[in-house]
Amino acid sequence: MPVSRRSFLAGVAGAGALATLAACANGGAGGAPQTGGRLRAAFVAGGAQETLDPHRLPQFMDQARAKACFDTLGRWEQDMSCTPRLAESWEPDATGTRWRIRLRQASFHDGRPVRATDVLYTYRRIADPATTASAAALFTGIDFAASRAVNDRELEIVLGAPNHLFPVALGSYGSEIIPEGTTSFAAPVGSGPFRFVSFTPGGPALYRRNDAYWDGAPALDELEFLPVADESARVGALLSGQIEYAHDIRATSAQQLASDSRTQVLTAPGAAFQFLYVKHDRPPFDDPRLRQALVLGLDREALARVALLGRGQPGNDMFGKGLQYYPDAVPQRTRDVDRAKALVAESGVTTVELSTGVTDPSWPAATQLIVAQLAEIGLTAQVRNVPPETYFADVRKNATMHFSRTGTLPVQNWIATTQLSSALTNSFSKYVDPEIDRLHAQALADPDEGARAAAIGSALTRIHDNIASPIWGISDWIVGVHGDVKGLQGFRPNTFDWANFAKASLG
Amino acid sequence: MTTLGPLTELAVAPAMPRRARLRGRTTRRVLRVLGWVLLAVPLLVAVVGPVLAPSTAPGGVPLQQPGPGHLLGTDVLGRDLLGLVLVGGTTVVSLTLASLVLAYAVAVPIGLLVAARGRILEGLTIGLLDVLLALPSLLVLMVLAATGRNGIGWLVLAVALVQVPYVVRLVRGAAAAPSCLATLEAMTMGGEPWWRVRIVETGRRVLPPVLVDATTRVSGVVGLLSAANFLGVGLDPAVVDWAVVVDQNMTALFLRPSAVLLPAGLLVALCAGTNLLVDDLLERRA
Amino acid sequence: MTARAGMRVGLALLQLVAVSVGVFVLTTFLPGDTAEVVLGPLATPEQIEMLRGQLGLDRPVWAQFADWVGGLVHGDLGRSIATGRPVVDDIGSRLGLTVVLALLAVVVLVPLVVVLGLYGGRHPGSPADRLITAATTVAHAVPDFALGLLLVALFALQLGWLPATAAGSVGLSGLTAPMLVLPVAILVSNQLGRLARQVRIGVVEADAAEHVAHLRRLGLAERTVLLRHVLPAGVVPSLQQFARTVDGLLGGVLVVEALFALPGLGSGFVAAVQTRDLPVVQAYALLFAATTVVVNLVADLASARLVPQAVRL
C-alpha cells in the first residue's frame, strides 16, 4: 500500500517519531506473505449488549469487527487525511455543497454489487437519530431529499451548507456501507475482506476470508475476535500462544513483550491525547489567572516520563499533534513555577478539586504527579475518584477539573464535536468562543487547502492560548503481536490501517 | 453469599488434646518462632517504618534498578520502593484494626442482647442479618464507589458490616454455652438485675472466644481490603498502602518483581504470622 | 417437622423478597443508566435521550421495578435492558461455567480435605500435622491475584504446560480441561486451609469421644471405627464452613474469572451492574440468594444424615 505508507510517514514525521516507527514496522520486503491460518485478536469488549451493527461502535472491538466485514468509501490515513477507498473518486462543485462520488466495482458477500443506492441507504440510516449512530454528526448535513443515485456506480450528495472537508466523513469509523434494506445484523453482509461466520454477544466473533474481495483476498483463512477484558490476561494469552494479537497494551507489559522472543510490540506514537480539562463557566477556573497558573504549573516532562512510562510525549494544550492541519509553529508550553505561584496567589484560590478515574491506565499515576505539582505552586488538589462506567457523563456535569482522553480523530472533527458553541452540551470545558465557530465554518467553506489549513491552525492556536483544552501528554498506542504475524504496524486507533487484518499473515 | 468469595470464617480453635501437646515439640517451637518473625516484621515495619522512610513522592524515573539514591529501586510511579514498603504498612494495620474493632463493637452487644432476650428477638435479628448477608457485598461496594463514598471510613464500615452477622452468631453461641449458663443462673438466683447478669457478666465470659475469633479474622479482613483494591473499589490510589502498591505494580510484576513481592509478602506474613501464633496461643491455653 | 420445614421454606421466600427489594433500593443510588453506558463517552445528549426512550428508561424506576416483579410472579425473569434478550439467556452460559468450576473445585477439595483432616486429627501435634496446618495457613494468606499471576508465569509462560487463559471460550463451549487447571488450583489453595482445619478438629473431638473409645474396646476394626464413626462425626462441624465455601464458589469468583478471562457469574454480575441493567442485576441477586438458601439447606440435611441426633431443621 504505497499511498498509505507515504502519508503515514508524512504524518508522523511532524511528531518526530520516525525512528520508533521504523523500528517497529514489520513485514513488507520479505517476499510474498504466507497464506492460511487463523489469526486470533483479543480486545477489551463491551459485554453482552454488543451487536454487529457497524454504525454503533462504542468500543474499539466493535470498530475492528466492522472493519473486517465492511468497507468504507474513504480511508483515514495516519495523519487523518482521507483518501478514496471503496469510492474511486469524489469531486465537489465550486461551492462545496454538491459532491459527485464514483464507486469502485465491488460486491457484497452475497454476490450483490455495491451500488449507489446502498451508499445512500447507509448514510440515511446513520443520520437518522433513531439509529444513535457513532458517526451521526458527520452525516446530518446531507440533504437526502436532494441527493440521488446517478447510476449504479455514481451518486450525487447534496449538503445543506458548503463543506470542502465532507469526504472526511466517508472515511470515518461507523460509516461502513451496508446493503440497501438491511435492518438486522444477526448475520451481517458487507463488502469487506472477511465474511461473517459466527458471533456470540460477549464472546468470540469468527470471520472467513472473502475470496472475491475487490482489493485482493486476505492472506488469512480465518479471523477471530476474542473479548479479553483484563490486560494481564491479554498479555498472558499472547505469550502462551493462545492469541496472535493483543490490543491496547500497557507500557510495562510492552517492555516485557519486547524482551520476549515469541512476541513483538507495535507502537503508534502520539495516538491518544491526554487532557486535563477545567470548566470555564464556574469557579474556580472561571478565573483566567488560575487557568494560566495551571498550565504553567504542570511538569509535562515528568508526566510523560512517569505516567506514560516514557511511551509518550509532553502535550501542548492543542489536540492533533502529528495530524493534518496542526500548527507546529506554536511553541511548547513549559513549566514556570514562579509565575504560576504568583498567579495562584493573585487569584486567591487555595483549593481545587481534581476528578480522576481508571479509564486510562496512566491516570492514577498522573493524578499523583499533578497533585504534587499543584502543591508546588500553592494549590491543594482534592482528588475525587469516579468509576469508569459513568466517568464521562459524571465529569461533564460535576467536575471542575478532570482527566479525559481522546484517540486520534481529524482535527476539524474534534473541534466540531467539542469546541463549537453548538457543541456546548457535549463540551467538557464549557468554553465558548464565537471566533472558533467562525474559523471552523471558514475552513469548511474555503476551497483553498492552504487557507483551510490556516483557519484550522488559527482555531487550534486560540484553543491553546485560551486554555480551552489543556493536554498534558500524548500517549503511544501499543499492540502486542505474536512473532509470526506479518503485515501489521503500529497504527493510530481510528485510522483505516489500525486493527485491519486484510493484509496480515501468519509467518 | 458473596461474590468476593468466602471472606469470613468461623472461629477455629486448633483442638489439641493433652497428650498431643507433648508431641512435635520441636516443630511447634520452630513454628512459634516463625509465627513471631512473620508477625513481627510487618508490624515493626508498620509502626517504625514511617519514621525511617525516605520520601515516597512520585515523579522519579519509574522502575529503576536498586542503587545509591534508591536502595530498593523505584516502582511504576517512580516512587522509592523502600519508602513505600516502610510507609505502606500503617494503613493496612490500622484499617484492619479499625474494621475489627467496629465489627465487634456493633456485633457483641447485639449478640448478647439477642442471647438474653428470648426466641422472637433472636429469630428476627438472625433473619435480618441473613438478608444482609444475602445482599451481594460486591454490589454494596460498587454502589459506595459509584456514589463517591470510597474513602477510608466507608471502606472500614463496609468491611466491618460483612463481619457482623458471623460475630453475632458466635457471641450468641458462646453466651448460650452450658458452662456459661450455669454460673449465670446462680447469679440470677442471687438477685442480680438481668442486665448485669446477661450483659456485663456474660460479656466478660464470652470475651476470650471473641478475642480468639478476632485474631482469626485478621487474614479475612486483610484479604477483603486487598480484594477491594483489585476491583477498583478500595482505597484512594494516592494512599501509600501495601495492598494499593501491589495493585499498582501488578502490571510490572515481570519487570520489577520486588515492587509486588515485597509488599505482598509483608501482607502474607502479617496474616500467616497472626494465624500461626493464635494456634500456638490456643494450644497453650487449652 | 413438616411444619418446621414449611416455615423454613416460607422464611427463605421472605428472604428472597427482602433481598430483591434491598437490591432495588441499592441500585437506585447508582448514577447513570444503560443508555449512557451503552452509547459510550462520545454520544451526544440527544442520542442518549433517544436511546433512553427506545429502551423505556424514561419511565420512573419504581415502575420499571414493578413491571419486573409482575413478570416474576408469572415466572418470567424479564429481559435485559441492554440486549433485549431474555435474562435467562444472558445468565445461562455463565451459570454453566460457574457450576463446573465450583464442582471441579469441590471434587478436588473434598478428598484433600478429608485426607489431610483425618491425618491431622489422628496424629494431632505430630510434626506432620503442625506443618500441614502451617502450610495451608500460609497458602490461604496469599492473595488470589498474586498466586494466579505467579502460577501463570510459571506453568503457562515458562514451562508452557498449561494455557494462560480461557480466552475464546463462551461459558462452556470452547472450554478445555487444561484451561481450568490453574483456576481450580487457586480456588482449592485458597479454601483448603480452613476446611482441612475444621475437619481436623472434628476428627480430634470425635476420636476422643466416649462412644468411639467404647467401640474400640469392643474390638471393632480400627478402619471401621475411623470410616464409620470418627469421620462422619468429624465432618459434621465443618459442613457449615463447607456450605459457605460452595456458596462463595457458586456466587462467582471474580478475581479468578478476570485473570483467566473466564466468563462466569462474578464478572457477569459486575458487568450487569456497570451497564445499569437492572433486570439482570436483580436476577443475579435472586440467583445468589437462592443459592445461599439451598446450599445451607443441603448442608443441614447432610448433617442430619451423617449424625442423626444433630437434626435441627
Image (spheres, helix red, strand yellow):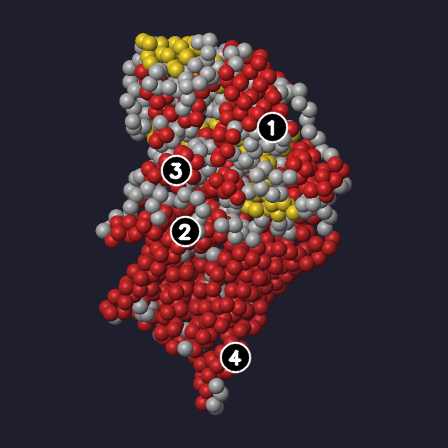
Q: Residues within 10 Å of mark 2 (few under 14, many from 20)?
A: some
> What label does residue B163 carry, if any?
none
Q: Which residue is mark 4?
A: B200
Identify the element where label 2 is drawn.
Answer: helix
Q: Is residue B146 above or below residue B31?
A: above
Residue A463's label in the rendered image is 1
Q: Position of residue A429 (x, y in %)?
A: 56, 35
**Side of B242 relative to A414 (left or right):** right
State how far apart marks 3 and 1 are (Cα).
30 Å
Amino acid at circle 1: Ile
Helix or strand or loop: what does disc 4 sit on?
Answer: helix
Q: Nearer the viewer, residue C115 or A247?
A: A247
Mark pair 3, 2: CA separation? 19 Å
- Badge number at residue C28: 2
> In 3D space, how far apart are the residues under numbered discs 3 and 4 (Cα atoms)?
60 Å
Q: In the image, C187: left or right of A121?
A: right
In what element is the residue under mark 3?
Answer: helix
Residue at horizontal 56 percent and vertical 73 percent from the top? B285
Query: Does the CB distance between marks 4 and 2 fall below 8 Å?
Result: no
Q: Is residue A267 above or below residue A341?
A: above
Pointers 1 and 4 in contact (CB under 8 A)? no
Q: Are marks 1 and 4 on the same chain?
A: no
Does dot 1 land on a helix, a strand or a loop? helix
Q: Which residue is mark 3?
A: C49
